[in-house]
Amino acid sequence: MLVARYAPQVVAITGTYHRECYEAWYFGRFGRRPTLLAGTNGDRHRFQVREVRDKAA
């Protein structure tokens, strides 16, 4: 998905998404907001998804 250069972005395994769109999708699917990590190397507008492993495995 193409996202504006300085729009808040979420970098996930499947691609880059607008932060508000990603949060709305995640909340609809899992019932809570995602845990996002702040960007690195000065990317204040880019966030990364914190991967959560299943504890049952």
Image (cartoon, rainbow, N blue to C red):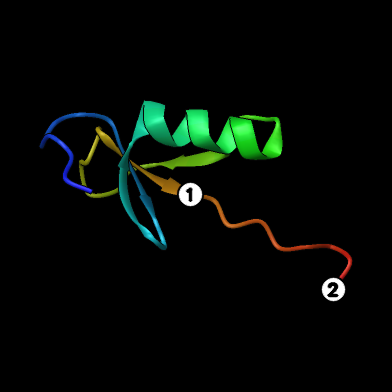
From the top left corner, tell me how far across and down residue 51 is, in percent.
Answer: 58, 57
Say if 15 sits above or below 35 in the image. Answer: below
Identify the residue position indicated by label 2 in the image: 57
Disc 1 to disc 2, C-alpha distance: 20 Å
Front residue of 47/30: it is 30
Q: Mark 2: which amino acid?
A: Ala
Q: Mark 1: which amino acid?
A: Val
Say if 57 sits above or below 52 in the image. Answer: below
From the top left corner, tell me how far across and down residue 35 is, in percent.
Answer: 57, 39
Q: Can you say which quadrant of the picture contains the C terminus?
A: bottom right
Dot 1 or dot 2: first in sequence order is 1
Q: Which image quadrant for residue 29? A: top right
Q: Residue furthest left?
A: 5
> Residue placed at 69% from the left, 39% from the top?
30
From the top left corner, tell me how far across and down residue 7 is, in percent.
Answer: 20, 29
Q: Helix, strand or loop at disc 1?
A: strand
From the top left corner, tell me how far across and down residue 12 is, in percent.
Answer: 41, 55
> Residue placed at 25% from the left, 33% from the top?
44
How packed mark 2 is, by other alpha carbons closer than 10 Å (few <14, some 14-19, many 20 or more), is few
Q: Residue furthest right?
A: 56
Front residue of 33/30: it is 30
Left or right position of 29 against 24: right
> Residue placed at 12% from the left, 34% from the top?
4
Identify the residue position indicated by label 1 in the image: 49
